Image (tube, helix red, strand yellow):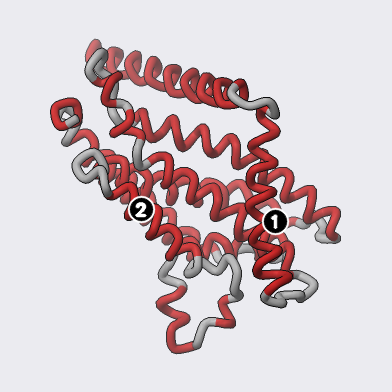
């Protein structure tokens, strides 16, 4: 009984630490710029504007729904990309703190994921406002949005934890991740509709969970349709298994990380 109480007390302390550190990091980030938290909005808007100017104007994708089609894809992708890019370095970047105090190493990527998720929510709310102004109506399928957000969060967490676990052993993997993300970007249905993919390769195309997640956002927000629950269930199961395995990997190397860094 005492052992269980101690574990619960430690868990409560770690949870409090995660929430406080997430808040502290967000506050520190806003204080480093003149625009503060508004930079979380302006930066992705500029990012999206560049893609729209290139693919929408220069390459001639001028269909009526291309702007919301593109913005929904970019918004979901940017959340995924930010967590992976930043989160893969969290354990490696915490080596000074590891020398001073013991903390479960899984805490570091979790804090980063929560930080990027808070910033994403600002952008997602702005996206919803844009879609409503563009003419898309709130519909009953919106009730599925919280579940979809949780599914993407779980999938993102699984990949981020795995990368954070192995990058300390292969630091140059950080640069490989950036290049892989660029390649995966063009295979995630952000710019092109799945119908543009040759039928012979479409089955392989849908093996990318981000394709299914981004299409589900569009299904709900643009087409007023409920998602494919079986697909989301499969992604959720895979993500939960991935989180469990990645966490075990981090725990396995818990005391080795400070030594190799």
Picture coordinates of residue 182 (x, y %)?
Answer: 45, 60
Judging depth in this view, the residue of 30 and 232 nearest the camera is 30
Q: In terms of image quadrants, where is residue 218?
A: bottom right
Whether residue 123 appears in this view of the structure is yes
Residue on which the image places disc 1: 49
- Mark 2 and mark 1 lie on one chain; the one further toward the N terminus is 1
Report the front residue among 97 and 107. Answer: 97
Quarter of the image with the C terminus is top left
Name the residue: 34% across, 51% down: 175
Please name the residue shown 77% across and 57% down the image: 139
Q: Are marks 2 and 1 in contact (CB under 8 Å)?
A: no
Residue 177 disc label: 2
Q: Is mark 2 on a helix, strand or loop?
A: helix
Q: In the drawing, does residue 260 fall left or right of residue 168? A: left
What residue lies at 85% left-to-right and 60% top-to-bottom? 135
Q: Position of residue 128 (x, y in %)?
A: 74, 50
């Amino acid at each position: 009984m005492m052992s269980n109480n101690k574990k619960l007390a430690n868990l409560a302390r770690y949870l409090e630490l995660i929430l406080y550190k997430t808040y502290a990091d967000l506050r520190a980030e806003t204080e480093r710029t003149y625009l503060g938290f508004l930079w979380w909005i302006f930066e992705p808007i500029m990012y999206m504007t560049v893609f729209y100017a290139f693919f929408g104007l220069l390459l001639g994708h001028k269909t009526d729904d291309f702007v919301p089609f593109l913005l929904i894809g970019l918004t979901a992708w940017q959340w995924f990309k930010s967590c992976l890019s930043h989160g893969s370095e969290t354990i490696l970047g915490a080596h000074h703190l590891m020398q001073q105090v013991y903390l479960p190493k899984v805490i570091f990527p979790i804090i980063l994921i929560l930080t990027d998720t808070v910033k994403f929510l600002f952008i997602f709310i702005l996206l919803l406002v844009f879609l409503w102004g563009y003419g898309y109506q709130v519909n009953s399928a919106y009730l599925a949005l919280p579940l979809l957000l949780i599914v993407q969060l779980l999938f993102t967490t699984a990949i981020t934890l795995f990368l954070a676990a192995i990058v300390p052993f292969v630091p140059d993997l950080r640069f490989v991740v950036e290049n892989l993300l660029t390649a995966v970007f063009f295979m995630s249905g952000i710019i092109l509709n799945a119908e543009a993919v040759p039928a012979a390769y479409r089955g392989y195309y849908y093996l990318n969970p981000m394709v299914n997640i981004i299409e589900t956002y569009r299904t709900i927000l643009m087409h007023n349709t409920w998602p494919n629950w079986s697909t989301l269930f499969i992604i959720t199961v895979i993500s939960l298994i991935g989180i469990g395995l990645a966490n075990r990997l981090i725990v396995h190397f818990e005391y080795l990380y400070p030594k190799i860094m």
